Image (cartoon, rainbow, N blue to C red):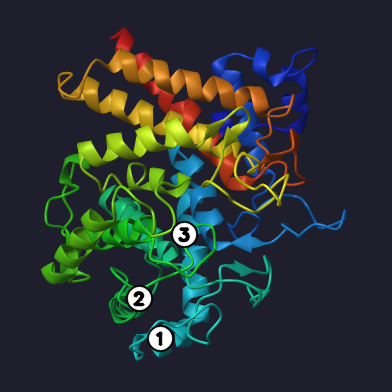
């Protein structure tokens, strides 16, 4: 891990008289990871971006729970598990701080709306961990799904997120499962990854299904691990929940919601969750690449109004997100690795590598000359959020995983 920690002076030395795109693959990884580290705070969280609202925009020098969990993913790919665990323990602290909301929500039997008292807020202060705003939809099921999925994954890899009081933590996790089943995560609406709605989202259903499946521990994810740890002995998940989630996800796919036939967020169903069939994954990929990829990134969905450059004619003028290109690269490099390790039963790995390379090269073209990933482009210009923490992290994951694929192919 230490080999990825660079002083600012070292970054400047690497980039002296060269732009980011002119660096070697290893140098790109080092520089990009250094920029991500600059967003990391002492308590293990990552501010969404350095932007403090100086130019009239929405302040992003705050914590988004989802952003932190994706931002710290890069640490796993550079071997810094200690940093990743610290980040997930911070999320656990937030859940413990607002546990009364989880407990209260678990007693309800109806959809709780945007900012009800039972809803864990998505955005909090980076020091006090206090909630910041009530202005938009906070009922986001994928936050819990991602947390359950990744904490279980880390435990199975020998890196426990569980704190010094494991009994209290497991009770909290059981409350989260009760909360999810009470609000009927498999059928009721939420505000999804983009904090818009309410609608029922396949990406939210898939996220929670992946989290519950990881802890249900019925063998679905066993192929990923060298040693098997029986998570179900710590957090029993009834089979009924898995079947309800799977049936619901199959009914919704390939659509994201009733109003969206496809959405960038659905790539999460392939990575990190790997919760869809091969046929479903191919359909999601085809929909995203055919309908959402643009010159400077991937739009979230057709007609997206966020930073739309022409709100009178929103379709065709949506903001373009570079992180979508990194996400596509990750998906294809993961398919390549799976193809290599299973005797090419999923098709020639070279085909997947070509697509992974293509998307990552396109992302590098829209990063800054010093290697920072912006949140988005609108009207041909990037907005203020440079770098965006989880976009920077996805670039690191994409670059490192693609490096590993090239190494595998050389053997």
Kindly tell me whether residue 93 is visible in this rendering: yes
Under circle 3, the secondary element is: helix
Write the residue at 38% across / 66% down: 200
State the quadrant of the C terminus: top left
Cα separation, mark 3 vs mark 1, equals 22 Å
Cα separation, mark 2 vs mark 3, equals 15 Å
Q: Residue furthest right?
A: 55
Q: Please state if 80 lies on the left or on the right of 405 as rendered.
A: right
Write the residue at 19% across / 58% down: 246
Residue 405 % position (x, y): 36, 20
Relative to 120, say whether 19 is above or below. Answer: above
Q: Nearer the viewer, residue 201 or 86?
A: 201
Q: Which residue is the site of mark 2?
A: 176
Write the residue at 69% across / 41% down: 387
Residue 217: which quarter of the image? bottom left
Q: Which residue is the site of mark 3?
A: 88
Kindly tell me whether residue 1 is visible in this rendering: no
Cβ atoms under marks 3 and 1 closer than 8 Å: no
Q: Which residue is the site of mark 1?
A: 105
Q: Circle 2: is it few (<14), some (14-19), or many (20+) Cα within 10 Å?
A: many
């Amino acid at each position: 891990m230490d080999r990825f920690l660079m002083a600012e002076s070292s970054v400047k030395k690497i980039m002296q008289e060269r732009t980011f795109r002119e660096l070697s693959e290893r140098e790109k990884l080092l520089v990009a990871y250094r920029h991500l580290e600059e967003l990391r705070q002492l308590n293990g969280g990552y501010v969404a971006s350095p932007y403090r609202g100086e130019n009239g925009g929405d302040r992003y020098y705050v914590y988004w729970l989802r952003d932190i969990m994706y931002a710290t993913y890069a640490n796993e790919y550079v071997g810094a598990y200690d940093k990743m665990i610290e980040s997930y323990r911070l999320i656990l602290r937030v859940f413990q701080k607002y546990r009364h909301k989880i407990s209260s929500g678990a007693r309800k039997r109806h959809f709780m709306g945007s900012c009800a008292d039972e809803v864990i807020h998505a955005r909090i202060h980076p020091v006090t961990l206090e909630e910041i705003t009530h202005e938009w939809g906070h009922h986001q099921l994928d936050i819990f799904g991602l947390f359950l999925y990744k904490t279980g994954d880390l435990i199975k890899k020998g890196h426990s997120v569980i704190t010094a009081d494991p009994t209290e933590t497991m009770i909290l996790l059981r409350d989260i499962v009760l909360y999810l089943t009470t609000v009927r995560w498999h059928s009721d609406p939420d505000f999804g990854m983009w904090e818009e709605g309410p609608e029922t989202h396949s990406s939210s259903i898939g996220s929670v299904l992946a989290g519950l499946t990881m802890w249900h521990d019925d063998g679905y994810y066993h192929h990923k691990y060298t040693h098997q740890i029986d998570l179900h002995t710590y957090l029993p998940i009834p089979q009924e929940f898995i079947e309800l989630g799977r049936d619901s996800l199959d009914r919704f796919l390939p659509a994201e919601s009733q109003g969206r036939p496809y959405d960038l967020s659905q790539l999460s169903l392939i990575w990190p969750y790997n919760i869809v069939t091969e046929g479903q994954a191919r359909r999601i990929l085809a929909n995203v690449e055919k309908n959402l990829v643009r010159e400077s990134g991937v739009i979230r969905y057709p007609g997206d109004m966020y930073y739309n450059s022409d709100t009178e004619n929103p379709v065709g003028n949506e903001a373009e997100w570079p992180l979508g290109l990194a996400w596509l690269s990750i998906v294809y490099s993961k398919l390549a690795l799976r193809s290599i390790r299973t005797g090419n039963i999923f098709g020639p790995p070279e085909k997947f590598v070509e697509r992974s390379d293509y998307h990552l090269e396109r992302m590098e073209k829209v990063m800054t000359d010093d290697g920072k990933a912006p949140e988005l482009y609108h009207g041909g210009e990037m907005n203020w959020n440079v770098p965006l923490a989880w976009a920077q992290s996805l670039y690191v994951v994409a670059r490192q995983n693609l490096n590993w694929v090239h190494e595998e192919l050389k053997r």
